[in-house]
Image: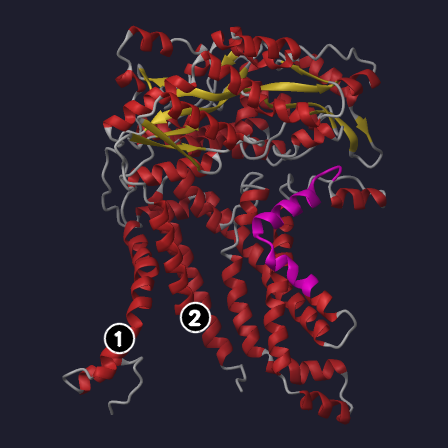
């Protein structure tokens, strides 16, 4: 027992020693927490960017630290912040903005904007991506790896079902009728092929925001201190989602796993799926059939939330490092690099002029699906983000899962979620 | 007098005014381990206890003393009660089954059967795998439509079922994974204990004409009781400590159906950043586990035959 504790202790100590930051050299070193959120050789890409930046700016060293998932990365960044030694910059979820402000962990980007050139740069991003980056008149994050939800469809299965393989559903009603034609029910009650699949594990609120936006409503206010989970249109959106499996029987019952949804699509178990544009390269490499990518179908209007990560600068980092990090940020979000990033990963390039670069315009001509996410941005809304974000979204997640598994009616589930949201947020007004 | 065990130095100090070189020596030997233990176990536990009576410090709001408020909030929280119920069901599901299976497997591979080493290794494999890997393997088993379970069911004409996506079966599914993972580990302890039992006992039983079951019930099982206690204590602790697979497989869902206490602590502490609530829940869990461990030692100790 003591021996084990001793070994554990020694391991912890040596771990702590290794993790201690390298002593500052004559040049400025910036530490950079980066979450690995999608598959593929993404760390190699980031390493290459850092090396290239160092070559152009010999006085700055960029040290990327791969910190796990988004959730693990914010845990590490906030823990480091509380211990007084945070990373200079990190890529964290855009929705964590309020949490980071409440913890006093980040510094506004506006502090670094001095020249007209800087001002132009800050205005160069898609406005949809800035919704989750600005509050109270200040900019707290810089869009970097951002995405939206799109619909992928299997053209072979469309043909098989007698549908035009090049025309995706454009409305909620079409989405149901197409899915009905694409579903192959079995006598036992299951299906060998579902018409449509919208994942609901982990963070169902994000997918649900697609439905609510299309239903013509919002889930929270801009100040991030009030939720509208109980609204009539919200219930209508949830009823539509629940009915896909309960009433129309075109969607798998219960909770659908986010992680296996692309695989279900490859295995032809689902003819249409909703998932992130970040999966585009994955689908392109693995689907053994022709597929299409479309904007989400419209209810009262089209719509999808944005998602993904922003750059933040730590408030407690030394001023020289903050300046260096800002320089790095400007460098990596230049049109050419944003274009390259879009080609390499499938994330949406964060600024319109990136699509005019030779690299990206060539890519879009060869692979038009890559432009769908960009075109959808004009319909995009801010992702659900409030004070105490994770707690408030969990209230919604629990309600959604209760309704989707049939333990609560959509009305009851949303009423309960709203009550919990009120309880948490009332003190922020 | 001065040769008293070094483990009880306070006694020595009261009897002789000047500590002998033996005492100092003993303390010096204990010091490294004690320092680390105090630094990494006792101090954090104490700090958690203190924190549980204060509000969560926020950037512009320092922590204030709130007495039992954090505890009151925990007991008012329906998700806490659900996590507690889930955890008790998880414990009832894992402890007896994994111990029973471990015993069965140990007795089985203790005999001289062909390919014994291979079977032993097969039983032990789940223990060697990291829980995250195990969870991912089982995630595939449970996947509707083309997962292993779905394919097996389909071969017999059954319908595909969404095992992890339904509130009725999700908890059972994660319980089975824990049993699968743990039984092999406990088997090793039973196997070691079985090998310690003198072969003469078995030979005597054969001479007396005792049946296999009788021999197990009256000789092997009583002799295994110290191991059973050890395994039981570990199984109970593990039932409240295993959450890795929850994170991978369900993240506590659907609608908290697989939320266990430790997972809830993680959620409160590192997703909601409500560190005080997490501290208070940690104390509740600690108290519960401490009570159970104490009860196990007090009640079972008397019925155990140590050689």
Disc on res. B294: 2
Instruction: Find residue B214 and report its image quarter.
Output: bottom right
Determine crowd level at label 1: few under 14, some 14-19, many 20+ residues with C-alpha closer than 10 A: some
Give the secondary structure at mark 1.
Answer: helix
| Apparent side of residue A163 relative to residue A390 in the rendered image (left or right) | right
Disc 1 designates what residue? B27
| Apparent side of residue A24 relative to residue B17 in the rendered image (left or right) | right
**Image mark 1: chain:** B
Residue A363, given in percent of the width and then of the height, sits at: 61, 12
Residue B33, given in percent of the width and then of the height, sits at: 33, 67
Part of the protein shown in magenta:
B121-146
The reply to whether residue A232 is visible in this rendering is no
**Could you tell me what secondary structure mostly forms the magenta stretch?**
helix
Report the front residue among A215 and A323: A323
Looking at the image, which residue is at 68% across and 81% down?
Answer: B217
Report the front residue among B198 and A196: B198
Depth check, mark 1 against mark 2: the one in front is 1
**Image mark 2: chain:** B
A191 versus B43 height, above or below? above
A267 in the magenta segment: no
Give the secondary structure at mark 2.
Answer: helix
Instruction: Find residue A89 and report its image quarter.
Output: top left
């Amino acid at each position: 027992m003591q021996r084990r504790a001793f070994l554990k202790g020694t391991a912890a100590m040596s771990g702590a020693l290794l993790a201690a930051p390298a002593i500052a050299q004559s040049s400025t070193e910036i530490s950079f927490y980066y979450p690995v959120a999608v598959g593929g050789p993404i760390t190699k890409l980031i390493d290459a960017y850092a090396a290239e930046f160092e070559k152009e700016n010999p006085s700055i060293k960029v040290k990327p630290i791969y910190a796990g998932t988004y959730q693990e990365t914010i845990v590490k960044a906030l823990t480091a912040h509380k211990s007084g030694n945070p990373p200079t910059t990190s890529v964290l979820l855009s929705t964590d903005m309020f949490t980071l402000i409440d913890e006093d962990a980040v510094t506004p980007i506006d502090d670094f904007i001095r020249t007209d050139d800087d001002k132009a740069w800050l205005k160069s991003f898609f406005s949809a991506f800035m919704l989750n980056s600005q509050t109270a008149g200040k900019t707290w994050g810089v869009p970097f790896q951002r995405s939206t939800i799109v619909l992928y469809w299997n053209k072979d299965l469309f043909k098989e079902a007698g549908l035009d393989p090049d025309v995706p559903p454009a409305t909620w009603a079409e989405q149901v009728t197409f899915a009905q034609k694409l579903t192959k029910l079995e006598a036992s009650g299951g299906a060998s092929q579902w018409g449509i699949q919208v994942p609901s594990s982990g963070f169902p609120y994000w997918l649900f925001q697609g439905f609510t936006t299309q239903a013509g409503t919002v889930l929270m206010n801009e100040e991030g201190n009030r939720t509208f989970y109980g609204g009539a249109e919200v219930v209508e959106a949830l009823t539509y989602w629940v009915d896909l499996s309960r009433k129309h029987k075109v969607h798998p019952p219960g909770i659908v796993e986010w992680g296996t949804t692309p695989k279900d699509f490859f295995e032809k178990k689902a003819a249409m799926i909703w998932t992130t544009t970040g999966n585009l390269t994955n689908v392109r490499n693995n689907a053994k059939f022709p597929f299409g990518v479309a904007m989400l179908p419209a209810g009262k209007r089209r719509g999808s939330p944005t998602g993904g990560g922003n750059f933040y600068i730590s408030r407690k980092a030394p001023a020289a490092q903050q300046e260096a990090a800002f320089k790095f940020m400007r460098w990596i979000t230049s049109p050419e690099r944003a274009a390259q990033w879009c080609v390499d990963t499938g994330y949406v390039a964060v600024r319109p002029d990136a699509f005019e670069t030779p690299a990206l315009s060539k890519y879009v001509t060869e692979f038009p699906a890559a432009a769908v996410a960009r075109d959808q941005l004009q319909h995009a809304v801010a992702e659900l983000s409030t004070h105490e974000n994770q707690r408030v979204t969990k209230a919604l997640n629990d309600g959604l899962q209760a309704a989707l598994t049939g333990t609560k009616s959509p009305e009851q589930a949303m009423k309960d979620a709203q009550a919990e949201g009120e309880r948490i947020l009332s003190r922020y007004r | 007098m001065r040769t008293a065990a070094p483990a009880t130095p306070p006694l020595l100090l009261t009897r002789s005014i000047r500590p002998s070189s033996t005492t100092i020596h003993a303390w010096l030997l204990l010091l490294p381990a004690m320092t680390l233990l105090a630094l990494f176990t006792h101090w954090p536990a104490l700090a958690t206890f203190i924190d549980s009576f204060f509000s969560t410090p926020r950037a512009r709001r320092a922590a204030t003393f709130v007495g039992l408020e954090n505890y009151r909030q925990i007991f008012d929280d329906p998700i806490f009660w659900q996590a507690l119920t889930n955890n008790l069901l998880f414990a009832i599901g894992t402890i007896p089954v994994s111990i029973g299976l471990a015993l069965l497997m140990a007795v089985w591979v203790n005999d001289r059967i062909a390919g014994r080493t291979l079977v032993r290794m097969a039983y032990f494999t789940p223990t060697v795998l990291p829980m995250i890997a195990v969870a991912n393997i089982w995630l595939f088993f449970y996947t509707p439509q083309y997962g292993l379970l779905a394919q097996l069911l389909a071969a017999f004409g059954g319908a595909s079922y969404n095992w992890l996506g339904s509130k009725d079966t999700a908890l059972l599914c994660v319980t089975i994974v824990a049993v699968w993972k743990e039984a092999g580990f406990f088997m090793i302890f039973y196997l070691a204990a079985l090998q310690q039992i003198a072969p003469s006992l078995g030979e005597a039983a054969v001479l007396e004409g005792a049946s296999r079951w009788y021999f197990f019930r009256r000789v092997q099982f009583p002799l295994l009781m110290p191991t059973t206690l050890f395994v039981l204590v570990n199984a109970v602790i593990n039932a409240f400590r295993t959450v890795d697979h929850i994170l991978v497989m369900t993240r506590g869902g659907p609608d908290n159906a697989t939320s266990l206490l430790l997972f809830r602590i993680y959620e409160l502490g590192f997703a909601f950043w409500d560190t005080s609530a997490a501290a208070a829940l940690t104390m509740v869990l600690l108290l519960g586990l401490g009570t159970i461990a104490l009860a196990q030692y007090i009640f079972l100790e008397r019925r155990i035959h140590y050689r």
